[in-house]
Image (tube, rainbow, N blue to C red):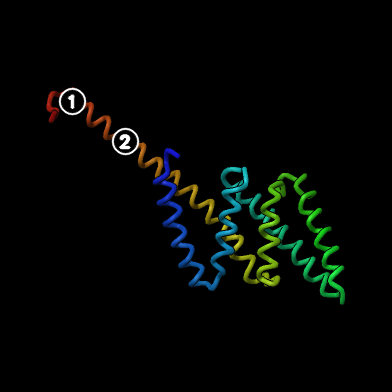
Amino acid sequence: MEHRWQIAISAGLLAAVWCGVADTFHLVTWIGFLGCSTYFAQPKANFQGVVVTWCTNLSGVFWAWLIITGSGYFDTPLVGYLFTGIATSAMCLQASYQKLSFIPGAFIGCCTTFAMGADLANILPALILGALLGYSMTLLTSQLITIKLKWLEFRDTSSAATTSSGTSTE
């Protein structure tokens, strides 16, 4: 972890910003962090990672919504168990499609939906923005790394110039 400080500064700063944004717009903070975590856990880089995060998280939301809604039409919990088994299988099988290939992302969206009682109005914005939060963290981290490398290059160049001109303070 050569760039631990840049990652820490980026993550800490943008996590604080996210908390403020979520509070201001009445978004569920922890759901945004789940979207952010999904972004970092899935294997794709850049905006492709955001797309995979959105697709997998939102597919999980869909499957949970289907389980909750479908089960509500029956008086026995056995139907809910059956729907859960079918949806679980579907979340695994859908990984054949590249944009749905990160299975844990589907389960994160599914679990979030169960935890929120299928309250889509509170789930969707935070989950979608959370993926963008993760992406923003990678962009800011890259910028901080670039700044550090340029500063080190400048420092080394300045040090070499000072040493070669004979004005070294050693």
Rendered residue at 57%/60% (across/down): 129
Q: Horizontal and vertical percent for residue 6?
A: 41, 46
Question: Where is residue 87 drawn, in percent x and y?
Answer: 80, 58
- Considering the numbered disc 1 on the image, is that residue within a helix, a strand or a loop? helix
Spatial distance from mark 2 to mark 1, Cα to Cα? 16 Å
Tell me the residue at 69%/59% (across/down).
58
The disc placed on residue 55 is none
Secondary structure state at the residue bearing disc 2: helix
The amino acid pointed to by label 1 is Thr
Task: Please state which amino acid type lies under the numbered disc 2.
Answer: Leu
**Snapshot quadrant of residue 64:** bottom right
Residue 132, x across and y down, in percent: 55, 55
The residue under the point 47% across, 59% down is: 15
- Left or right of 117? Residue 39 is left
Mark before the other along the chain sequence, 2 or 1: 2
Furthest residue in direction bottom, as rendered: 75
Q: Which mark is residue 163?
A: 1
Q: Is residue 31 above or below residue 135?
A: below
Q: Position of residue 93 (x, y in %)?
A: 80, 49
Horizontal side of residue 137 vs 73, given as left or right: left
Q: Nearer the viewer, residue 21 or 85?
A: 85
Pick whichever, 110 or 26, lies toward us. 110
From the viewer's perspective, tell me whether residue 102 is left or right of residue 80.
left
Q: Residue at x 48, y 63 (%)?
A: 18
Label 1 crowding class (10 Å Cα cut-off): few <14, some 14-19, many 20+? few
Asked if 24 appears above or below 130 in the picture, the reply is below
* Label pair 2/1, CB-CB below 8 angstroms: no
Q: Which residue is mark 2?
A: 152
Horizontal placement of 51 versus 75: left or right?
Answer: left
